[in-house]
Image (cartoon, rainbow, N blue to C red):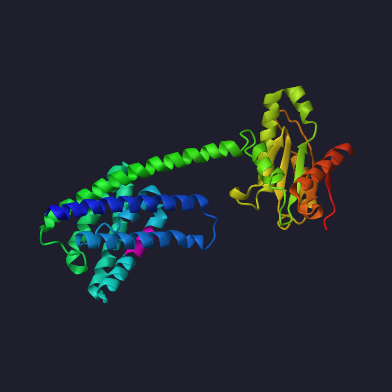
Amino acid sequence: MIMYVFSYLILMVIILNLAISTLISMKLLMHNNSGSRYEQWIKPIIYVAMVYTEMSVSFNFIGVVAHEYLFALLIFYLVDKNKAVFLVAVTPIIRIMYIFFVDGHVTLVSVIATGIVSILVIVYLKVFSKFVENQLLSMLLCEILIVATEIAFSSYIPHVVIYSLFNQSTNWIIRATVAVITVIAVRKVYLQVTSLQEKNLELKKEVSFDKLTGFLNYKKFEQDILMNVNTRNNIGIAIIDLDYFKKVNDTYGHDIGNQILQQFSIFLRKHLAYKLKQTELGIYRYGGEEIVWMFDPVLFSDVQEYLEIVQAEFEKIPLGGKNHYMSFSVGISFSINHHFNLKKTFDEADNLLYESKKNGRGQIVIDNKI
């Protein structure tokens, strides 16, 4: 009996580690998801690997396949409800695979029983999450009921055999206790880890983004353009500058100037980033009212014509709550014309911006594309 309890304690520690690793992996994949169809399969693959490992460890340590729905429950409450429901539906397949690899055969009764347990688990998750407001209490009640259901169906599913050392009620108490401790511990650790991750993301955002405009800041501009000089692909760089912005600050004050700059930033983001993902947003606040836009010439093949339309629309917008109307000037250059050197491309765009200002402002000057 002592050895059995000791084995269960070791199993609990292993499940804790597997569960935390699974949750953190899922969370990181959610943050970094690029939308690739291959990445869509990474989460289920991780889940299958972790659950299969848990089943194997569980059976080898205590002679029982136990707590296989615990990971899905944690994912449901802490990461992604919709994904978790799918993973619950996948779990019976993992169990049947495990039974087949261990025994070499699977009975129809065990397949049906495993499927019924899976359906009941989904019902429990939906019901408890809806009607029990306290998340931790909802998780614990749901997991206890799942354990009870697994034991109730144990006689129909191979490798859910109750050790003769314990009667069924005692086994239920031990498994339920382990489940409760595991849920509480994993939830606490996971929330602490994700809290630290979110703080790190906020710090990273503060380091890379300008607070006023929400665009990437000058430091990020230096890293991406001035320090990362050469590129293999053709990249367009446009420098966009509000005309007579200094006059606005002198006339209305810096508060109104900042308000206008924020309006301008929202307008630019709407029109310049609509083809890009948030993680690929290549718009920088270079300084003051000067904005640098790094874009793909393939996506914006008609960039001059497009910016002329955008410019005409902007000139109709009243700004700063003062019915003040403004224009902007643009200089555009392409890295293909400068041996794919971003620094030289930027310098040329800056020269072209100066030319547009010199010619009366409100103009778009572009170098010749090869």
Identified at 57% across, 36% down, the residue is 206
Q: Which residues are magenta?
A: 85-91
**Residue 336 falls left or right of residue 97:** right
**Residue 72 falls left or right of residue 251:** left
Q: Quick check: can you spot residue 229?
A: yes
Q: Is residue 86 magenta?
A: yes
Q: Residue 277: x percent and y percent?
A: 60, 51
Residue that sits furthest to the right in the current view? 359
Q: Residue 11: x percent and y percent?
A: 25, 54
Q: Residue 32: x percent and y percent?
A: 52, 51
Nearer-the-camera pick, 128 or 249: 249
Nearer-the-camera pick, 313 or 190: 190
Count of marks, rendered view: 0
Q: Residue 222: x percent and y percent?
A: 68, 41
Identified at 67% across, 37% down, the residue is 218
Q: Quick check: can you spot residue 267?
A: no
Identified at 84% across, 43% down, the residue is 352
Vertical order, 211 against 104 (above or below) = above
Q: Quadrant of the C terminus?
A: bottom right
Q: Quadrant of the N terminus?
A: bottom left
**Residue 337 falls left or right of residue 288:** right
Quarter where residue 150 is shown: bottom left
Q: Is residue 265 magenta?
A: no
Quarter where residue 61 is shown: bottom left
Query: Would you say the magenta stretch is mainly helix, strand or loop?
Result: helix
